[in-house]
Amino acid sequence: MANVAGRSAAALALGARIWKEIDEAYSIQCLRAAKSLYALGRKYEGYQQGNSFGAPYRYNEETWNDDMEWAGAELYKATGDNSYLMQAKEYALKSANADSWMVRDSAAHYQLYPFINLGHYSLHEVVDRDFKKTLESFYQEGIEYTLKKAQASPFEVGIPFIWCSNNLMTSLATQLILYEKMSGNTQYQPYLIAQRDWLFGKNPWGTSMFTGIPRHGDFPVFVHTAPYVKLGLEIPGGLVDGPIFRTIHFNLLGLTLERPDDYVSRQNPFIVYHDAVGDYSTNEPTMDGTAGSILMMAYFSRK
């Protein structure tokens, strides 16, 4: 269960530093919990999958070195204990790009989650120059792999269109931003902009992938989510799953189109997207995908 324990420990250790000057008692609680969870991850190295009872599909997560790397880095920053730093570096070398979808052409549903290794970025701040270069190379290798595939796309998109492709897109954008910050290398700026533009409508369907954004533009309306289906609520800012390979879409169970396809003339033989409640594979807002877009939004809000 090191995957869940690791990233939970990382979040709590980060919280301990944030709250230290605001609420010391709460900060101490966060740090105590972070240490406990990290120890749990060390004891039970491996992964715990989250699966809905009775559902036909699994969340196939099987990585954990990335989570423990992040936890070790954050605990070192919070405590100054060198053992956390040494362990974080060990996990970093084990994770490298083995835990990354960016150097693969496909993956099972949530197999390589989280979709970005934040441990590399967190650790980069506290290691020597040579190890910094190693961490930068991990990020750059993933970027270059997707960029090579993007050269065949008129939209400069190189992600695999597996389920939740938009989550991959926001993670790639985040990795591009963090790599630039780590290395000072700005050569991938045009590629970053292409990923942003795809999410906001520069795609075959001409639609934003965020509910309610832009206010007077084309965006997902008939989303696969309870607030909309049960209450008719339109909640702005949610990132939907996004386009998916037709070969995957065709084999998913229970997909329905309860209304005419607005984009029927824009569909293509390779990937598909529907603004329809019944298409849970392309039009369900996801919490992790939406959260993953925050850094990208913040980055471009300063431009």
Image: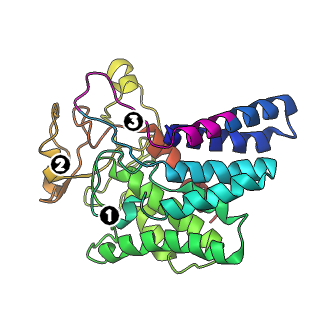
Q: Position of residue 55 (x, y in %)?
A: 26, 26
Mark 3 to mark 2: distance in Å? 22 Å
Secondary element at image label 1: loop
> Does residue 200 appear in the picture of this structure?
no
Quadrant of the image for the C terminus? bottom right
At a point 63% along the width and 56% down the height, the residue shown is: 88
Q: Which residue is mark 3?
A: 49
Rounded to the nearest angstrom, the CA distance separating label 3 from label 1 is 21 Å
- In the displayed structure, 136 sits above or below 187; it is above
Which of label 2 and label 1 is nearer to you? 1
Reading the chain from its start, which is encountered first: label 3 or label 1? 3
Where does label 1 land, which residue? 104
Q: Nearer the viewer, mark 3 or mark 1?
A: 3
What is the residue that sits farthest to the top in this orientation? Answer: 230
Does the magenta segment cover residue 166? no
Q: Amino acid at mark 2?
A: Ile
Q: The disc labelled 3 sits on which kind of residue?
A: Gln
Q: Earlier in the sequence, mark 3 or mark 2?
A: 3
Q: Residues within 10 Å of mark 1 (few under 14, many from 20)?
A: some
Q: Is residue 162 left or right of residue 240?
A: left
Label 3: how many residues lie within 10 Å, few (<14), some (14-19) or many (20+)?
some
Q: Which residue has dot 2 on it?
A: 248
Mark 1 is on which residue type? Arg
**Is residue 282 among what the camera can see?**
yes
